[in-house]
Amino acid sequence: MKVLVVGGDGYCGWATALYLSERGYDVAIVDSLIRRHWDQQLGVDTLTPIAPILRRADRWRELTGKKIDVFIGDICDYPFVQSFMRSFEPEAILHFGEQRSAPFSMIDREHAVMTQVNNVAGNLNLLWAIKEFNPAIHLVKLGTMGEYGQPNIDIEEGYITIQHNGREDRLPYPMQPGSFYHLSKVHDSHNIRFACKIWGLRATDLNQGVVYGILTDQTGMDDMLINRLDYDEVFGTALNRFCIQAAIGHPLTVYGSGGQTRGFLDIRDTIRCMEIAVANPASAGEFRVFNQFTEQFSVLDLANMVKQAGDDAGLNVELRHIENPRVEKEAHYYNAKNTQLRDLGLVPHCLSESLLTSLLQFAIRYKQRADPSQIMPTVTWK
Amino acid sequence: MKVLVVGGDGYCGWATALYLSERGYDVAIVDSLIRRHWDQQLGVDTLTPIAPILRRADRWRELTGKKIDVFIGDICDYPFVQSFMRSFEPEAILHFGEQRSAPFSMIDREHAVMTQVNNVAGNLNLLWAIKEFNPAIHLVKLGTMGEYGQPNIDIEEGYITIQHNGREDRLPYPMQPGSFYHLSKVHDSHNIRFACKIWGLRATDLNQGVVYGILTDQTGMDDMLINRLDYDEVFGTALNRFCIQAAIGHPLTVYGSGGQTRGFLDIRDTIRCMEIAVANPASAGEFRVFNQFTEQFSVLDLANMVKQAGDDAGLNVELRHIENPRVEKEAHYYNAKNTQLRDLGLVPHCLSESLLTSLLQFAIRYKQRADPSQIMPTVTWK
């Protein structure tokens, strides 16, 4: 089966591309490499030294005999989209190819507008290309649990049945996203739902939680296959950041009280979820939404777990509550459903001290590459 | 009070600008005039011959002594936005300045992407400009009743209280928009709600129904002040189109069975609603949603009313059910709330045979300008 991984040079995309290639899928990558450029512009870098995309793909082929085609270009450029649709003829498109950082989208007006225009237009182009070339293609789109915000009722998977004034309907779940980035994902979801309805396309929206971890069986095979690991304030995410902070002796940066609760998952579960979605496509005309996380934690829970694992490893980790740069609730109800991917076969890797220890050891290995000045938040929501 | 009307050269914007000027507001218009260019590109034209924007504004001043400043430019161009914010210093911004046709957005990929990028980026620029120059400015944004789609429960005004699994929350009303244009308005609504939350902005989203009619006390004062009247398949809307079809002897184009039900209002109520919103601003941090329509009709109801009024005027009007170019339900529950504007003082002009007769007479006056080849739909949703 031919699977195109859009954004295949990124953290989730690269791990997914190798995993699906290993599992026997015929994989190609599309990437504009703009994320590497943004890193340069912001003066940040992955903790791990990642190889250029073509070198990585070549090394994968040397080690496994499996070929991954790489198309370098921007999906906002429709003639480019047409060219890879014609030459690769995908049966599924896994779309990770968006600006994916909330703080990046909050830097200033330019970054907000660019994030929304880039994400919305790129996603629209993929929808129109699927319609133009092969409406049977299954679009698997990376959404985010952040689309839901923190409602005071249970979070369902994309839809909710509402009783109101004696009548009932199953409607799209109300969304309360918390950054211009998260908003762009809500826009995408609405656009995809409409395309499925009018053109009969098939799509799965994966509302993913915060991903942690670094090693997968594939990216761990060779230094040339190593995945990116972000620890800076803009692209770094909660648990990975805490582990790297612990490794380099920086206090753990708990935003506000740390009561913010979110869904999390191991990157090894991300890649498995992608396989499950691809192997079980949505029906023609169906816009399906899965909540893709395995466990819920508060930020303070995570910080305490990292402190424990770090202290056990002799690191003497300090927690620091710092002023929250975001506008968000720090104490709230949070109960999100995540049964559909498990029903299709996901067996979660739950967060354990051994995972934290391994991630800490990994961070220590590369700690001389860390720039401590990139850790404290400077981008604020106000 | 200084009120900026963005999109003030358009059908609703022009009528609103004159009305508010007459009522004593200090009005300025911002418009890119792109709509006149799109008319040229599509080979369509308003039935009424409208004067160039500067001529119209000059004539208004000659007749009333009231000055309306005109800023010609594109709100997607932020330096232009900064320039009018600095020089006019508005206290309220009425934002009509978007691509507002569903069929236009469905022409092809380019029109879909352009509609969403134009509408979303322009609206984001206004939000950032309000934050930058004066967060106390009240943004009054034109949304559409089409954001809601046709749910099987009552449509509330922007929010709905949901009981679920023993808990309760008041959440944004779930949206099911029916074109790439309608989707752009949903994107805008989400963006504005977020800006109100994080920056404390004040905004009113007016989810407007289908507007009909042409004359207001101000636009009817002089031929140089005449408003546009669209009858073509792309920019024409249901009731106005039927009246012009009747006037030129074209069968009334009922899409499908005609059971599609929507909210409608007279343009004289549109301008009054704008005044009500401006005179009763949202609170700091509040994102307020009003449903701006006065009556519900099905398309077939309207066609029959126009046929009756036309026949009474000796026109011999024919109804024709044609294949529906849209993907939409033709039989559905529809019950939308619209109490908030009435509670603030709106006294509706209900649709009457006398309004239809007057609109028919108006259309007959200009019927030699009509191009019958622009009436049948060619843009399809499929």
Image (cartoon, coloured by chain):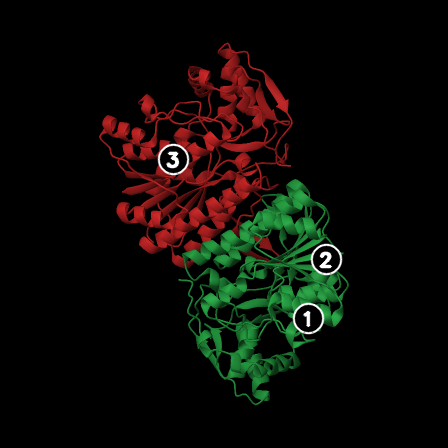
Chain colours: A green, B red
Tag 2: residue type? Val
Residue A344 relative to residue A56: left or right: right
Question: Secondary structure under badge 2?
Answer: helix
Chain bearing mark 2: A
Whether residue B344 sits left or right of residue B147 in the image: it is left
> Distance from label 2 to label 3 (Cα)?
48 Å
Residue tagged 2: A278
Marks 3 and 1 sit apart, C-alpha to C-alpha, by: 60 Å
Q: Residue at x 58, y 23 (%)?
A: B253
Q: Kindly indicate whether the residues beneath marks 2 and 3 are on one polypeptide chain.
A: no
Question: In the rendering, which numbered label is found on residue A59?
Answer: 1
Of circles 2 and 3, which is in front? Answer: 2
**Closer to the observer: label 3 or label 1?**
1
Q: Name which residue lies at 63% across and 47% down.
A: A82
Picture coordinates of residue A124, whole percent (x, y) = 58, 48
At 44% from the left and 51% from the top, the residue drawn is B192
**Label 3 SS:** helix
Along the line of sight, which residue is nearer the eye, A371 or A185?
Answer: A371
Q: Quadrant of the N terminus of chain A?
A: bottom right
Amino acid type, callout 3: Gly
Closest to the camera, between mark 1 and mark 2, is 1
Residue A350 percent across, percent down from the top left: 67, 73
Going 66% across and 81% down the picture, which residue do you hit? A354
First along the sequence among labels 1 and 2: 1
Residue placed farthest to the bottom in the image?
A: A314
Measure the C-alpha gap from mark 1 to mark 2. 25 Å
Q: Is residue B309 toward the left or the right of residue B132 in the image?
A: right
* Residue hosting label 3: B13
Q: Nearer the viewer, residue B118 or A324?
A: B118
Residue A266 location, quadrant: bottom right
